[in-house]
Image (cartoon, helix red, strand yellow):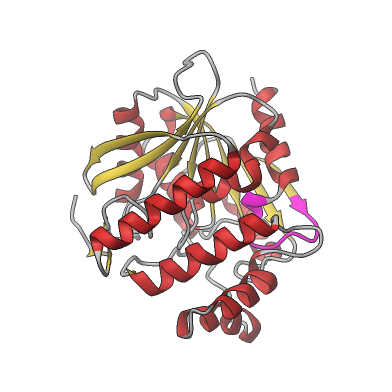
C-alpha cells in the first residue's frame, strides 16, 4: 500500500503519555476498562479498543470514528450502553487521526482505506460484523463495503462525510476554523455548541464535555495533522452492495442533512432506512437515541 502522508504528535513520548492518561480518566469515570488490541496493518500499528469482545457468540459491531476524534468518544457518558444490546464492540483508532495508532495514511481517493479496514477485521479474527462510522468513519465503512462486502452484515452511516462535499457556508467555515486558528477552551466550546451538539436536546454531561474540550485542544495543538479530509464519493457509492442505514442530525452544519439524504437515496443501492434526528448536531454518535436506533436494528436483524 502506498503511503500518501504521515501525521504525528509534536512530541511522541509526552503526547502519547497525555493521551494514555486521558483514556485512564475516561475508564475511571465509566467504571470500565477497555480491552486493547495493537495490530500490524499496511499503515503500521493500528490500535483498537474493545468492549465485551471475548464472547464470540455475541453480535459484533466495529466502529470507525470521525476526523479529529478518537473512537472512545462513542462511549462518553457510557454511550455504548444506549445500544441496549450486548455486543462485541471494537472501536478502531483510524490511522492518521490524533490517537495512538500510527499516523500513516493512504490517498483517500483510492480504495486503500477499505483494504486497511479489511486487514483490521482479519487481524482481529472478525469474519463478519456490523460496521458503523461517524463523519470520516462513514467513508471508511463505504470503502470497506466496496472492497470486502462479504465481511459486512450492515453499514450504519452517522452524518457521514462521503455523501456530499464539506459545506462551504460562511457559518460552518467560521465555527470550524475558529478553534484551528486559536485552539482555546472558549473557541472549542463555541465550535462544539454551534456545530457538534444542539443543546439542550443533544449534549454531554459536564464531565464528558470537559473531556472532549481537553481532547480537542490537545488534538489541534499537539498533532501535526496531514491526513486528507473526507470527500463526496459520488459514483463510488454505487459500488457498495451492502445493507445501509443512514442516520442524520437536522442541525449538522458540516454536511447538511437534506443533500446527504438526497444523494444517498439516489446512489446507495441497498439503502434500507433513513432516520432523521431532530435538534441533533454533527456529533450524532454521542446522541442516545441514535445509539438506541442502531441497537434495535442489530437486535432484530435477520
- The residue that appears at 39% across and 55% down in the rendered structure is 19
Instruction: State left or right for residue 66 relative to residue 117.
Output: right
Instruction: State left or right for residue 275 relative to residue 98.
Output: right
Q: Is residue 12 above or below residue 122?
A: below
Image x and y of residue 82, in percent:
70, 37
Magenta residues span 276-286
- The residue that appears at 26% across and 53% down in the rendered structure is 102
Image x and y of residue 22, in percent:
45, 53
The answer to which of 143 and 281 lies nearer the viewer is 281
- The residue that appears at 70% across and 50% down in the rendered structure is 287
The answer to which of 201 and 217 lies nearer the viewer is 217
The answer to which of 57 and 118 lies nearer the viewer is 57
Please state the total of marks drawn on the protein image: 0
The answer to which of 136 and 236 lies nearer the viewer is 136
Image x and y of residue 257, in percent:
69, 62
Q: Is residue 295 within the magenta segment?
A: no
Q: Is residue 144 above or below residue 201?
A: above
Whether residue 70 is visible:
yes
Image x and y of residue 121, in percent:
36, 31
- The residue that appears at 43% across and 67% down in the rendered structure is 218
Q: Quadrant of the C terminus?
A: top right
Q: Is residue 269 above or below residue 130?
A: below
Q: Residue furthest left?
A: 2
Q: Is residue 280 within the magenta segment?
A: yes
Whether residue 269 is visible:
no
Instruction: State left or right for residue 63 relative to residue 148.
Output: right
Amino acid at each position: 500500500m502506498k503511503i500518501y502522508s504521515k501525521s504525528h504528535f509534536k512530541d511522541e513520548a509526552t503526547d502519547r503519555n497525555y493521551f494514555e492518561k486521558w483514556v485512564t480518566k475516561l475508564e475511571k469515570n465509566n467504571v470500565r476498562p477497555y480491552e486493547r488490541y495493537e495490530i500490524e496493518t499496511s499503515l503500521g500499528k493500528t490500535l483498537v479498543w474493545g468492549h465485551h469482545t471475548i464472547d464470540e457468540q455475541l453480535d459484533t459491531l466495529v466502529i470507525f470514528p470521525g476526523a479529529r476524534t478518537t473512537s472512545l468518544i462513542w462511549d462518553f457518558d457510557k454511550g455504548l450502553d444506549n445500544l441496549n444490546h450486548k455486543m462485541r464492540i471494537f472501536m478502531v483508532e483510524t490511522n492518521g487521526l490524533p490517537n495512538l495508532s500510527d499516523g500513516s495514511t493512504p490517498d483517500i481517493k483510492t480504495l486503500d482505506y477499505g483494504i486497511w479496514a479489511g486487514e483490521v477485521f482479519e487481524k482481529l479474527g472478525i469474519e463478519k460484523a456490523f460496521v458503523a462510522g461517524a463523519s470520516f468513519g462513514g467513508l471508511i465503512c463505504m470503502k470497506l463495503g466496496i472492497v470486502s462486502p462479504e465481511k459486512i452484515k450492515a453499514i450504519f452511516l452517522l452524518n457521514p462525510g462521503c455523501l456530499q462535499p464539506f459545506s462551504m457556508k460562511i457559518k460552518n467555515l467560521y465555527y470550524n476554523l475558529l478553534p484551528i486558528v486559536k485552539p482555546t477552551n472558549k473557541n472549542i466550546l463555541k465550535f462544539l455548541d454551534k456545530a457538534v451538539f444542539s443543546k439542550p436536546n443533544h449534549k454531554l454531561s459536564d464531565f464528558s464535555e470537559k473531556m472532549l474540550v481537553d481532547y480537542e485542544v490537545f488534538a489541534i495543538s499537539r498533532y501535526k495533522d496531514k491526513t486528507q479530509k473526507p470527500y463526496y464519493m459520488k459514483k463510488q457509492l454505487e459500488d457498495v452492495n451492502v445493507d445501509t442505514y443512514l442516520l442524520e442530525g437536522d442541525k449538522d452544519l458540516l454536511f447538511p442533512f437534506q443533500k446527504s439524504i438526497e444523494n444517498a437515496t439516489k446512489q446507495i443501492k441497498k439503502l434500507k432506512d433513513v432516520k432523521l434526528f431532530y435538534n441533533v448536531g454533527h456529533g450524532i454518535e454521542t446522541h442516545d437515541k441514535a445509539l438506541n436506533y442502531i441497537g434495535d436494528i442489530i437486535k432484530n436483524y435477520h
